[in-house]
Image (cartoon, coloured by chain):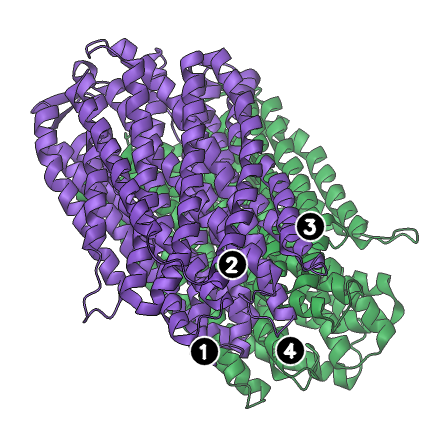
Chain colours: A purple, B green
Amino acid sequence: MSLGLIFALLCAIVALGHGLTLVSWVLVQPRGNERMQQVAKTIWAGASAYLHRQYLTVTVVGLLMMAGLSHWFGVETGIGFLIGALLSGAAGYLGMQISVRANLRTAEAARKGVEPALQVALRGGAITGLLVIGLALLGVVGYYMILVPHDAGDIQGQMRALHALLGLAFGGSLSSIFARLGGGIFSKSADVGAAIVGKVEVDLREDDQRNPVAIADMIGDQVGDCAGMAADLFETYVLTLVASMLLGGLLLGDDGANAIVYPLLLGGISVLASAVGVFFVKIEPDDSRIMTALYKGTTASGVLAFIFFVPVTWMYLPATFTLQEVNAELSRWGVLGAAAVGLGLTGLMTVISEYYTGIDYAPVRSIAKASSTGHATNVIAGLGVSMRATAAPALVICVAIWAAHEMAGVYGIAIAATTMLSMTGIILALNSFGPIADSAAGIAEMAEMGDPVRAVTASLDAVGNSTKAMTKGFAIGSAGLVALVLFADFTYSLAAEGRRLSFTLDDPVVLIGLFIGGLVPYLFSAMALEAVGRTAAGLVEHMQAPDASRLVERLSTATIKEMLIPSLLPVAVPLAIGFGMQWLIGGDAGALALGGLLIGTIITGLFVALSMTLGGGAWDNAKQYIEAGHIGGKGGDAHAAAVTGDSVGDPYKDTAGSAVNPVIKLINIVALLMVPLL
Amino acid sequence: MSLGLIFALLCAIVALGHGLTLVSWVLVQPRGNERMQQVAKTIWAGASAYLHRQYLTVTVVGLLMMAGLSHWFGVETGIGFLIGALLSGAAGYLGMQISVRANLRTAEAARKGVEPALQVALRGGAITGLLVIGLALLGVVGYYMILVPHDAGDIQGQMRALHALLGLAFGGSLSSIFARLGGGIFSKSADVGAAIVGKVEVDLREDDQRNPVAIADMIGDQVGDCAGMAADLFETYVLTLVASMLLGGLLLGDDGANAIVYPLLLGGISVLASAVGVFFVKIEPDDSRIMTALYKGTTASGVLAFIFFVPVTWMYLPATFTLQEVNAELSRWGVLGAAAVGLGLTGLMTVISEYYTGIDYAPVRSIAKASSTGHATNVIAGLGVSMRATAAPALVICVAIWAAHEMAGVYGIAIAATTMLSMTGIILALNSFGPIADSAAGIAEMAEMGDPVRAVTASLDAVGNSTKAMTKGFAIGSAGLVALVLFADFTYSLAAEGRRLSFTLDDPVVLIGLFIGGLVPYLFSAMALEAVGRTAAGLVEHMQAPDASRLVERLSTATIKEMLIPSLLPVAVPLAIGFGMQWLIGGDAGALALGGLLIGTIITGLFVALSMTLGGGAWDNAKQYIEAGHIGGKGGDAHAAAVTGDSVGDPYKDTAGSAVNPVIKLINIVALLMVPLL
C-alpha cells in the first residue's frame, strides 16, 4: 500500500471530520422565531419530498445501467458505477440538508449585522464544500485501494482498476446530470412561474408567503443550486482525478505507478488548503465589498496548496521522465508549472465571471439601462452580453492549454485540470453560500423580519448571485480542460489496443462527428429550455388552487417526466454515432466519428454553457441593480422589463447552461467506455 | 477559348437579358394613386440616401484593401477585388431599386386579388435573382477569360488566374458583409424602435404613417432584406464557383483544365433553369397554400437543371479520373451523384426551414401559445425553438457530406456545393419576393387601401416571412458545404507549396485554432446584437422630433459607425491568429492554427446562424399567427408578448444570424490568401 494513497485517504477523512465539526457549529446557532422556523420547515419538507422522488427515478435507471456495465465491462466497473451514483446522490442530499438548516440561522444572525450573517452562511457553504470533496476523494482513493490492494509495479492491474474507476465517474456523472437538470427544471419553472404570477397579481411580492409559487421557488433553489451544484462538482472533481490518473498510466509507462497516484496527492493537499482558506474570509471594517473577502479565501487556498505541491512533486516524480506515445521529455519543473497554470486559470475565470455578472460593472449595467426602453431591448442586450462574455474565458482557456502543453505536454493539461479542480472545495463553499443567502433573504421577507434585516440578507443575496455565477464559470472552464484530457485518454486507450488513429480535420467521418458533437449542446439546451417553459406555463395555469404542497407535488411530477429524455441524450448519442458509423462505413469509422464527436461537443458546449451561465447571471443582477433603486427602481417600467430578462436568464443559466457541463463529460465517459467494444 | 466558357458567358448574358425584359414588364404595371406613390417615394429616397453613404464607407475601406492586395499578391488580384466589390455593390443596389418599384405595383395589383399581386411581387423578385446571378456568372467567367485568354493545358497559368478570382470573391464578400451587417443594423434598429414606440404610444399602429419610425422600418427592409441579401447571395455564389474551380485545379492535375470550367457550366445551366422555373409558380384555384406554388417553381428549376447536367458531365469529364493528393478514382456517375446530393440538400433545407418558421406547424404555434403566459415564456420558447431547429439541418448536412464524399471524394463535396448554390437564382427570386410583399403590405396600410387589399398583401407578407427564412436556411446550409471546400482548398494549396500538414484533433495548436474559430461567430453576433440594441434605444430616445428624414439621417450615421468594427473582425482574426501563432511558436504553427480556426468557425457558425435565423423567423410568424386572430388576437396580452419576441427575433435573424454567413466565408478567403505568406 503506497504511502501516498494513505496520505490522500487521511486528507479526505480530515476534510470530512472538519466538515462535521462545522455542522455542529452551525447547528448551535440560534434558529429564530416560530414563524421563521415554519417557513424553513416548509422548504425542507418540499425539497426532501422532491429529492426522494428524483432519487427513486435515478435508482431505477441506475440499476439498469449497472447491470449493463457489469455485463459488458465486469463487476468491478458495475460496482464502481454504483459507488459513484450513491456518493453523488449523497453529496447532493447533504448539500441540501445543510443549506436548509443554515439559511434559517443566517436570517437570524442577520439581526446582528452583515459579518455574523456572512459567517453562518459561509460556514454552511463550507460544510457542503468539505463534505462533497471529502466524499469524492474518499470514494476514488478508497475504491482504488480496494482494487489495487498490493503495491505498484503491476501497471496492467492498475489500468484495470482505472477502468473500474471510470465506472465510478460514470455513476457520478449520470447521477449528477439528473440532479442538475431535474433541479434546474424544478427550480426555474417555479422561479419563472413566480415571476409571472407576481406580475399578474401585482399585490403579491415575489417572496410573499401567500404566494404558493414563491414557496415552490425557494424549494427549487435548494434542489437546484444546492443539491444540483453539489452533485455536479462532485462529478467534475471525480472525473478529473480519474482522467488524469488514467492519462498518467497510459503515457508514463514505468513511471506510471507514481504518476497515477500523483493527482490524488494534489487533491488531498488542496482539500486541506480549502478548509483553511475558509478562515481567511473576513470582512474588515474598511472593506466595502464582500467579494473582496471571498477572493481572499480563494487566493489563500490556492497559494497554500501550491506551496505544498512543491515537496510532493519532488517526492513523487522523477527529475525527468518520458511521455510515451508522444515521446516528449518532461521535468518536475514543467509539471509544477502546469500545476500553476491550473491555479491561475481558476483565478482568471473567477475574475472574468465576476466582471460579466457583477452589479458594479458595465455588462450588467448595460442590460439595466436597456430595460428602460422595454422588454425587447432588455432581452437583446442580455443576449448580446451573454455571447460577448464567452470571448475572454475562451481566450484564457486557449492560453492555459498552450502554456500547460508547452510545460509538460498533454500530461501538463491533465495536471492543470487537476489543480484547477483541486480548488473545488473552496469554490463549492462560496457557491453554496449563494443559495443559503438567497433562502435566508426569502425567509427574512416571508417572516417579515423588518427592513434592517432584509437589507443585510439582500446584500448577501446579491453577492451570492455573483458567487453562483463564478462557480458556473469555473465549472465550465474546467470542463474545457478536462474534456481535452478525456479526449487524450480516448486516443491513447485506442492506441493501447493497437489502434493508432489520426483524427484529421479533412476526414469526412471526423467532420461529421464534429458537427453532430456540436449539435448535442444545442439540442440538449433546447430540450431543457422547452421543459422549463412547459412546466412554468402549466404551473401558472394551475394557480387557481393556491395550495403549496399540491403545487410542489404537481411540479415534481412534471419535472421528473421532463428530465428523463434529455438526461439520457449524452448516453444515447455516442452509442448511436459510434456503433452507427461503424456499421455504416466500417474500418475505423466508429472510433473516428466518436473522436470528432467529443471535440465537437466541447467546442460548441463551451460557448453555449459560458454564454448561458454568464448571460443568465448578468440578467439576474441587472434586475437586482434596478431593485436597488436605479433606473426607476422596483415597480417601474424598467423593472418589469428586467423581471422578464431575469426570467429568461434563469433557465438559461440554471437549467440549460449549467447542465451542459455534465453533458460534455458524460459523452466523453461513454466514449471511453466504448473503446474496447469498437 | 474554350467552348464551355463561351457557353457559360452566353447563359449569363441570357439571364441578364431576361431579367431586363422582366423589368420592363414590371414597370408598365399600374403604379396606383398619388398617396401610394408618395409613400413609395419616401421609402426609395431614404433607402437610396442610406445606400450612398454605406457605399462611400465601403469604397474607402475597399480602396485601402485593394492597394494592399495589389502590393502583396499582384495587380490581377487587386483588380479582381475591385470587380467583386463593385459587382456585389451593384447587385445590392439593383435589388433595392427593383424592389422599391415592384412593391408599389404589387400593392396596386392586390386590388385585383392574390394571383395578380403574387405575379408582380414574384417577377420583381425574379429580376433580382436573375440580375444578381447573371452579374456573378458574368464577373467570374468574364474575368477568367481575360486572365486566361489562351486555351487550356497551361495549368500553372490557370492556377494564377484562380488566385486572382479569389480576389474577386474577397471583394464580393467584404462588400457583402458591410451590406448584410449595415442593412441589418439599420433595418432592425428601425424595426425594434418601431415596435417599442408602437407599444409606448398605443394609438399608433406599427405601419402608421404618422409614425416616422415606421417609415424608417420600411426603408430598412429594402436596405437589409433586398440589398443585403442580394449582396450576400452574390458573394456565396461567386465564392462557391471559385472554390470549386480551385479545388478542381488543385486535385485533378491533367484533367484539371476541364474540371476548372465544369462548375461554371453547371452554373450556366442552372441560371437558365431558374429563369424558366419562375414561370412554374402559379396558383391553381384549388391551391390553399401559396408555398406550394413556390415549391413547384423550385422543384421545376432543380429537375430541369439536373436533366441538362447529364450531357454536360458526359461532354466535359472523362469516364474516370484520379484525384491527386488523395489518390482516389472518380467516375462521371459519381460526380453526377454528388450533383444530385447538392440539389437534394437544397430541397431538404427548404422544407426544414419552412417547418420551423411556417405558421402552420408546431414550432411557431408553441411560441404563440407560450405568449399567453407573458413576455418571458415567449422568449424562452423562442430560444428553445431556435436551438432545436439546428438539429435537422445539421443532420441533413452531415448526410450530404457523407454521400457526396462517398460518390466523388472531396471533389464531390465541391460539386454538391456548386449545384446547391446553382439554385441561387430561383431561391433569391423567392427571397426578394419577401421584402416586396412586406413593403407592399406597408404601403397598403399607410395609404389606407382598405381591408380587402390589406388582407391580400398580409397573406403575401406571411409567405414572404417563410421564403426569407428559407433563403437564410439555404444560405447557411450551403455555407457549411462551401466552408469544407474552402478548407480543402486551404490544405491542398499548402500541399501545393510543399507543406503537407496534418490537422489533428490532439494537436494543441489546432485545438486553440478550433476554440478561437468557435469564438468568432459568438463575438461577432454579440457585437451585432449590441449594435442594434444601442441604435434602437438611441432612436426611441430621439422620437420627440418626429421628422422621418432627420430620423433616417440619424439612423444612417449610427449604423455606419456601428458596422465598421464587426465587419473587419473576420479579416483581422485570421491575420492575427495565423501570423501571431507563427511568430509565437514557429514551425507550421501559423498554418495549423489557421486550419483549426476555419473548422472552428464553421462548427459554431453553423449552429449560431441556424438557430438565429430559424428562431427569428419562428418568432416573427408567431406574432403573425396571433395577429391573424388566435390566442386573443391583436392588442391582447399574448400579442404584447409576441411583439417582444418578434423584436428580439428581428436582430437575431436579420442582423446577427444572417451576417454570420459572410463571416464564415470571409475568414476562409483571408486564410486562403495568406497561404503564400505563411
**Residue that numbered label 2 is attached to:** A39
What is the C-alpha distance between the residues marked 2 and 3? 40 Å
Viewer-nearest residue: B240 or A3: A3
Task: Tell me which label, 3 or 4, sits earlier in the chain.
Answer: 4
Seen at 19% across and 10% down, the residue is A153
Q: Nearer the viewer, mark 2 or mark 3?
A: 2
Are discs 3 and 4 located on one and the same chain?
A: yes
Do marks 2 and 1 share a subunit?
no
Q: Is A553 placed above or below B343 here?
A: below
Residue B557: give its label.
Answer: 1
Q: Residue at x 55, y 66 (%)?
A: A644
Which residue in the structure is indicated by mark 3? B363
Please identify, in this view, whether the residue under mark 2 or under mark 4 is nearer the observer: 2
The percent position of residue A407, horizontal first and vertical second, equals 16, 35
Residue identifier under label 4: B199
**What's under tag 1, amino acid-wise?**
Thr
Q: Chain of mark 1?
A: B
Instruction: Inspect the image, locate mark 4, and give the three-letter code of the amino acid beneath it.
Output: Lys
- Helix, strand or loop status at disc 1: helix
Do the numbered discs 2 and 1 sit on residues whose CB atoms are within 8 Å? no
Q: Mark 3 and mark 2 in contact (Cβ < 8 Å)?
A: no
- Calculate the distance from the C-alpha at mark 1 to the C-alpha at mark 3: 38 Å
The image shows residue B498 at horizontal and vertical percentages of 28, 29
